[in-house]
């Protein structure tokens, strides 16, 4: 009896119908190769080629989630750019299909690190979409599942470097969730750590297989804000642009970086190229390109062209961010052409818009002032000076700012704006010792409405002192920033001030 039972148990154990199946190594490699081809095609905006590669991979093993994830990624980015409800629903449908495939794949073949990585990624995408839709409970739930899947994947395979992008993004972003939303972080149970997050994203950008490109793109966006390194971010973007020359999103982002370093002409030409292209699969980029193209024209003092660009943006855009700035500048352009009535319409729109974004808060205030009284000669001179500064014409900017300072009966606020403009222009060209007195002068200047000038002047004075080797003096100036409240660009300035204090070895 014992012998028969032993034989029966052995037979059951070895039975092919009861033994766990394993996805053949060759099939895994084929799916991996086709998925990489699909993702690279998608990055080059060859969406047809991307879908063909993903479909071929799915035919090898319909249960593997990675090909489904590739298709979901395309719709995910399309939704982020155009905010279309149709695309959001399409994304949720593909996300559900990806999740179902991944779960059944593990039921059939057992636990697999790449499957868990795919599940972590799709839950992460879904968390982001739910967050954008203000469905915060669902976002927290999906975020928790995403993070757990990434951790499980790394536990199975510590060399699965793609998973470091997932955990890195969580560690980085959690740090910046506003206080009113901290309850979401509590539901997720994840701790924020910007340094760890940046380190993990760097690992993914250097050693990842599937997400290397995505990691490099994220780093290009985060490095300037995290470390004050715009050159490194732009370098990453240039490398991505060389690798994926047909990627309109990368081209657009590179143009934005060119604007940040005051190369308006190059940025304008790049954006114009984007606007001349036929509608791409990732629609929505053209809307943002219209806004940035208008910004370039405005900074180059082509107000009529800028007005047309702002109006096109306002007609196409479905969100609130940037609309106060676009409305204010469209109004300014109308008024410069003598159309005060049309200008008033856009000034009112600027005042009515949301002001979460620093530039929008500033623009709304300027628009409110212009509703009460028309443009003055000082107003137009100030805009001309600021445009020269933003376009890299430093000598001309300083000349115009100085002209305002020498104008009889100039208002306290305009005098302060001109003084700050001289200091900031000198700072831009790295003349820190020359810039410092201008910022310090603003500490005791009478300012009525442009109160943001004082904390920002303390910040710039601190950085100037740090550049000159005066760590203690720099820290003292930077700490002054936290004595101000309710001003434009407050969150961004406090973040930068904390970052500089940390670099100096001082506590905020």
Image (cartoon, helix red, strand yellow):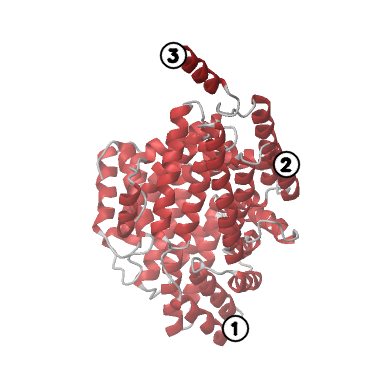
Distance between mark 1 and mark 3 Cα atoms:
104 Å
User: Is 19 drawn above or below residue 448 in the view shown?
Assistant: above
Question: Dots 2 and 3: beta carbons under 8 Å?
Answer: no
Q: Position of residue 190 (x, y in %)?
A: 34, 43
Q: Callout 3 environment at 10 Å: few (<14), some (14 to 19), or many (20+)? A: few
Is 167 or 68 nearer to us in this picture? 68
Q: Are marks 1 and 3 in contact (CB under 8 Å)?
A: no
Residue most extreme to the front? 1
Task: Name the spot of residue 142 as percent of width and height, x first.
Answer: 44, 50
- Judge depth for marks 2 and 3 and give the one in front: 3
Q: Is residue 427 left or right of residue 443?
A: right
Q: CA distance from mark 2 to mark 3?
A: 55 Å
Drawn side of residue 98 relative to residue 52, left or right: left
Q: Between residues 195 and 363, which one lies in front from this camera angle?
A: 195
> What residue is at 33 percent from the left and 36 percent from the top?
469
Task: Return the residue nearer the eye: 122 or 185.
Answer: 122
The picture places residue 261, in percent across and down from the top left corner, at 55, 49
Q: On the image, numbered disc 1 is attached to which residue?
A: 338
Q: Are marks 1 and 2 in contact (CB under 8 Å)?
A: no
SS for dot 2: helix
Residue pointed to by mark 3: 2
Q: Quadrant of the C terminus?
A: top left
Q: Above or below — where is 227 with respect to 370? A: above
Q: Earlier in the sequence, mark 2 or mark 3?
A: 3
Quadrant of res 50? top right
- Residue 444 placement, left or right of 316: left
Residue at numbered disc 2? 53
Quadrant where the N terminus is found in the figure: top left
């Amino acid at each position: 009896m014992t012998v028969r039972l032993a034989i029966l148990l052995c037979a059951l154990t070895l039975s092919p119908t009861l033994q766990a199946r394993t996805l053949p190594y060759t099939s895994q490699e084929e799916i991996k190769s086709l998925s990489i081809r699909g993702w690279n095609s998608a990055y080059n905006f060859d969406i047809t080629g991307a879908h063909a590669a993903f479909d071929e991979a799915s035919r090898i093993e319909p249960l593997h989630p990675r090909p489904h994830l590739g298709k979901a990624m395309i719709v995910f980015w399309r939704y982020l750019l155009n905010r279309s409800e149709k695309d959001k629903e399409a994304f949720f449908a593909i996300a559900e299909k990806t999740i179902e495939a991944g779960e059944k794949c593990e039921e059939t073949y057992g636990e697999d690190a790449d499957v868990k990585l795919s599940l972590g990624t799709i839950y992460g995408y879904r968390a982001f979409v739910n967050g954008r839709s203000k469905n915060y409970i669902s976002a927290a739930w999906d975020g928790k599942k995403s993070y757990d899947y990434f951790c499980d994947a790394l536990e199975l395979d510590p060399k699965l470097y793609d998973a470091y992008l997932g955990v890195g993004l969580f560690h980085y972003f959690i740090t910046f969730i506003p206080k009113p939303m901290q309850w979401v972080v509590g539901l997720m149970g994840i701790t924020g750590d910007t340094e760890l997050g940046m380190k993990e994203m760097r690992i993914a950008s250097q050693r990842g297989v599937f997400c290397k490109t995505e990691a490099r793109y994220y780093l290009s966006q985060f490095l300037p804000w995290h470390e004050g390194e715009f050159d490194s971010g732009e370098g990453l973007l240039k490398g991505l642009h060389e690798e994926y020359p047909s990627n309109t999103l990368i081209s657009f982002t590179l143009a934005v970086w060119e604007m940040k370093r005051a190369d308006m002409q190059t940025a304008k030409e790049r954006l114009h190229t984007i606007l001349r292209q036929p509608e791409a699969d990732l629609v929505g980029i053209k809307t943002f390109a219209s806004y940035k193209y208008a910004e370039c024209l405005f900074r180059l003092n082509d107000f009529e062209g800028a007005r047309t660009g702002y109006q096109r943006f306002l007609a196409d855009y479905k969100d609130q961010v940037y609309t106060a700035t676009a409305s204010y500048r469209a109004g300014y352009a109308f008024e410069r052409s003598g159309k005060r009535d049309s200008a008033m319409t856009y000034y009112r729109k600027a005042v009515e818009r949301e002001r979460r974004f620093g530039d929008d808060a500033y623009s709304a205030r300027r628009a409110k002032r212009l509703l009460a009284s028309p443009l003055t000669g000082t107003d137009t001179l100030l805009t001309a000076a600021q445009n020269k500064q933003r376009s890299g014409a430093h000598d001309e900017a300083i000349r115009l700012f100085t002209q305002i300072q020498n104008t009889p009966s100039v208002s306290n606020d305009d005098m302060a704006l001109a003084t700050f403009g001289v200091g900031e222009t000198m700072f831009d060209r790295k003349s820190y010792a020359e810039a410092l007195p201008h910022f310090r002068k603003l500490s005791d200047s009478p300012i009525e409405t442009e109160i943001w000038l004082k904390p920002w002047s303390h910040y710039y004075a601190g950085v100037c002192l740090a550049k000159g080797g005066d760590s203690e003096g720099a820290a003292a100036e930077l700490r002054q920033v936290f004595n101000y409240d309710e001003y434009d660009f407050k969150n961004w300035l406090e973040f930068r001030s904390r970052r500089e204090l940390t670099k100096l070895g001082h506590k905020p």
